[in-house]
Image: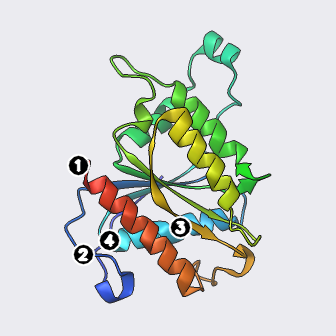
Amino acid sequence: MIPMTMEPMNMATTDMTMVNMTAVKILVLAGSLRRGSYNRQLAGAAARELALAGVDITEISLADFPLPIYDADLEAQSGVPALALQLKRQFMIHHGILLVSPEYNASVSPLLKNAIDWISRVRERGEDPLPAFSGRVFALGAASPGKFGGMRGLMALRQVLELGCGASVIPQQVTVAFADRAFDETGHLRDERDAAQLRLTLRGLIDAAQRIL
């Protein structure tokens, strides 16, 4: 888990309206563990932008929350894994969540889908169903070496979140095509159009998160 808090950078370099956003808590999570993952690079780029905008940002890795494949029999026998509870609580303490997922056969990555499935099963005393997905807003991102930039995978992820979990997902999203050449050696996006799309998505997430403070 990497908490990141930095002073806001100059407006000329972020294109984000500078307001007091230190109360806004944003979680960034990539649905990939692969070394050199384009989606982990995109998540890192997003975390830097959010931190520089003055947001209270936490970037976590699913490597720190290894979970078995969801199995109702396993849940009935052993209950929800402790790491699923911890991950759900991470969702609960943030106002906005950015999920960055690779596309697997035109759908969401199994790693991220399994995490969502387990989180959806966690319900602590007195909570309504699906508590981790209500009272906060979500934004989506993807990077792919293909020409669609993971867009088809995000369609599936949006369906899982909105229809399956009842989550509020902002309409803006970032898709980075030809991701094998989209990032420079420091992990920044080379193409200004990709960078602008990322900033627009993050701006939408911040604005939506501020409205629920």
In-front residue for pair 105/94 = 105
The nearer-to-camera label among 4 and 3 is 3
Q: Residue furthest top?
A: 77
The answer to the question of whether label 4 and label 3 lie on touching residues, with beta carbons closer than 8 A, is no
Using the numbered discs, state the Cα–Cα distance from disc 4 to disc 3 in whole angstroms.
14 Å
Going by the numbered disc 1, the residue's amino acid type is Leu
Residue for badge 1: 213
Q: Is residue 213 left or right of residue 68?
A: left
In-front residue for pair 153/57 = 153
Going by the numbered disc 4, the residue's amino acid type is Met
Pick whichever of labels 4 and 3 is earlier in the sequence. 4
Residue for badge 2: 18
In-front residue for pair 166/16 = 166
The nearer-to-camera label among 1 and 4 is 1
The nearer-to-camera label among 1 and 3 is 1
Pick whichever of labels 1 and 3 is earlier in the sequence. 3
Does residue 141 show up? yes
Vertical position of residue 16 compared to residue 34: above or below: below
Q: Residue furthest left?
A: 20
Pick whichever of labels 1 and 4 is earlier in the sequence. 4
Residue for badge 3: 44
Residue for badge 4: 6
Does residue 31 show up? no
Using the numbered discs, state the Cα–Cα distance from disc 3 to disc 2 in whole angstroms.
21 Å
Where residue 150 sits in the image (x, y, percent)? 68, 62
Pick whichever of labels 2 and 1 is earlier in the sequence. 2
